[in-house]
Amino acid sequence: MAIAIVLGIVLVALVLFSIDVVPIEVSSLVVVCLLAVTGVLTPEQAFEGFSNDTVIFIFTLLAMTEGLASTGVVQLVGQRLAFFARFGHQTFVLAMMVVVAVFSSIVSNTVTTAAFLPVAIGAANRAKVPKSKVLLPLAYASMLGGMVFLYGTSTNLVASAAFPRFGLEPIGVAELSPVGFPVAVIGILVVVFLGPLLLPARVGKGAVGDWVLRDYLTEAILPPDSRYVGKELAEITEGLGLRVIGLVREGESMPAVPTYRLMGDERIIVEGNREDILRVKDLRGIEIRPDVRLSDTDLRPQDTLLVEATVPTGSPLIGRSLKETLFLERYGLVALALHRKPAIQRLTKLQMLGRLFGGQSLSALPLSVGDVLLLRGPREKVQELSDGVNLLILGDVEYQPPRYGKWLLAVVLFLGALALGTFNVVPLSVAGLAGMLAMIATGCVDARRAFRVDWRVVLLIGSMLALGVAMEESGAGRFLGNLAARAGEYGGPRTVLLLMMALTIVLSAPMSNQAAALVILPVAVGAAAKLGVDPRPFAIGVTLAASCSFITPLEPSCVLVYGPGHYRFTDFFRLGTPLTALLLAFLVAVVPLVWPFHKAGAEPARAREPVSERVFVP
């Protein structure tokens, strides 16, 4: 009876996740509620997943990556990745996936995904590539790279630790490489070529934390003591990752040639998103021209606001420039940059650039309905302007300038925390918590920013842990495994191997991939014994198949990108299905070649793993 109830709950969960009508975090909590109400699990068991060490570690890991972002480390790596975007979208995704897969081959795939998540978002924004086209390949690359070496994913470690119970030698450090490396290469190529066709070009719907891909134009100048004077423009365009549209010197416009040597008296026309513009404002040696006039040293940072404001219909600013309306003097706010919507503008972008190159400043351009201004000024002045008559305030811009002086300290703390957890000096959760608190204490990241995490990750992983426990405690996983083993015996060892690996992939959706491997391992070894063949190819095949959970977003690496990428459940199914099918066919064909089906020399042990050792570590 318990098996039927659990399988029914699994079916309900898959339906809820698939139709994507109810938010995925709510669907996850429905699963926990059903498990507790039906009596399959006690309340303590149902909610135990939310206090799991892995969930705590993921939370602290995300907080530490905020520390890397706030000290400028993430921006630097993102700029380097964005360089490949000039060669096309596929080249950019290929470069990112290769880098992520290399890291993931020696570091946990969830750790790698969390560390590269802000990097990929920043690089995608800078390269003008939708996040939905980038973040899922990021997660898949981390999962593929984890199959190369033993330490690439904890699934390998958990399975290897269980091998001796079945009379098998543990997995060697590079034993999986002959199969794992080509799997990673094939997987990356499939995603690079099919991703643009199957992944949606989806943007956010205004949720908190969405990245705005709105382009602004602004003017920048080099102060007399700027370190860029006498250097080539490439130092700014490529070294700083800024898009320079052109230069104006003594009233004459000049193209943005990378080899042009800056004299220091040019006006530099810069285009970029909001983050680009704000980053320029805080760089040493280059200044936003309108901001030069706002030099009130008595104005404390906590008394100022950065806001985006649009020109509404009927505004007295329509058709008039900021200079003409004495905007700074009248409203006490400085316009750092201007965005013009193509659909409703009165001046095209080309005409606007022509006026800038012709000698007019940004403040001399007439405003149109729908123009968006990036404004900075005293808090009370912003409040006075929020009547919606002259300008309509779109929202505050929470921005903290990068703490470049602490980037090395942030990297040391981050790597130190990972090293402590990886080498079991302290538990992963304790190492992550210590690293997060150290970053906050040393000023690498603000406490409020560190705790700005996506709690859907915590809810989803905690809920899936409960479902995994139910699958094991009720015997539902073992029941399905035995059915597959009996059905496959009539088709020979390769057919049984295919069924064992396919079932592992299926079970890794509602369960953790580690739990799925541990449930199927004894079934696969027993099936090999009945067939009179070596159980090692079955055990290795199950281990590798557990890392091929590409069809659903329930694998921890996929969970991390689900929200930021604005994905739906079906997005993973569209790309993950052909990827999983191809890799499964490859593994079934190659695994027996590397680990042959020769007759086992001894009867393998069939002892079931102790319940106390069932762990979930992404």
Image (spheres, rainbow, N blue to C red):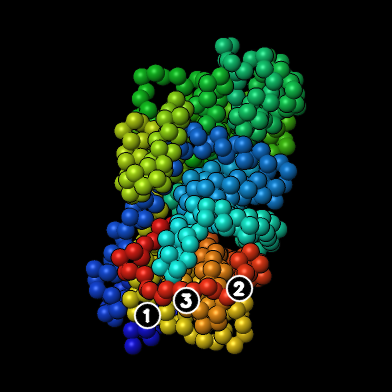
CA distance for labels 3 and 2: 13 Å
- What's the residue type where badge 3 is placed? Glu
Q: In which quarter of the image is residue 411?
A: top left
Horizontal side, residue 232 vs residue 32: left or right? right
Q: Badge 3, how many Cα within 10 Å: few under 14, some, many 20+? A: some
Q: Badge 1, how many Cα within 10 Å: few under 14, some, many 20+? A: some
Q: In which quarter of the image is residue 286?
A: top right
Helix, strand, or loop for circle 2? loop
Q: Which mark is residue 475?
A: 1
246 vs 474: above or below: above
Earlier in the chain: of badge 3 and badge 1, it is 1
Q: Disc 3 designates what residue?
A: 603
Residue 97: image x %, image y %? 61, 50
- The residue positioned 65% from the left and 33% from the top of the image is 243
Quadrant showing the N terminus: bottom left
- The residue positioned 61% from the left and 27% from the top of the image is 219
Contact between labelled residues 2 and 3, with CB atoms less than 8 Å apart: no
489 or 102, nearer to the observer? 489
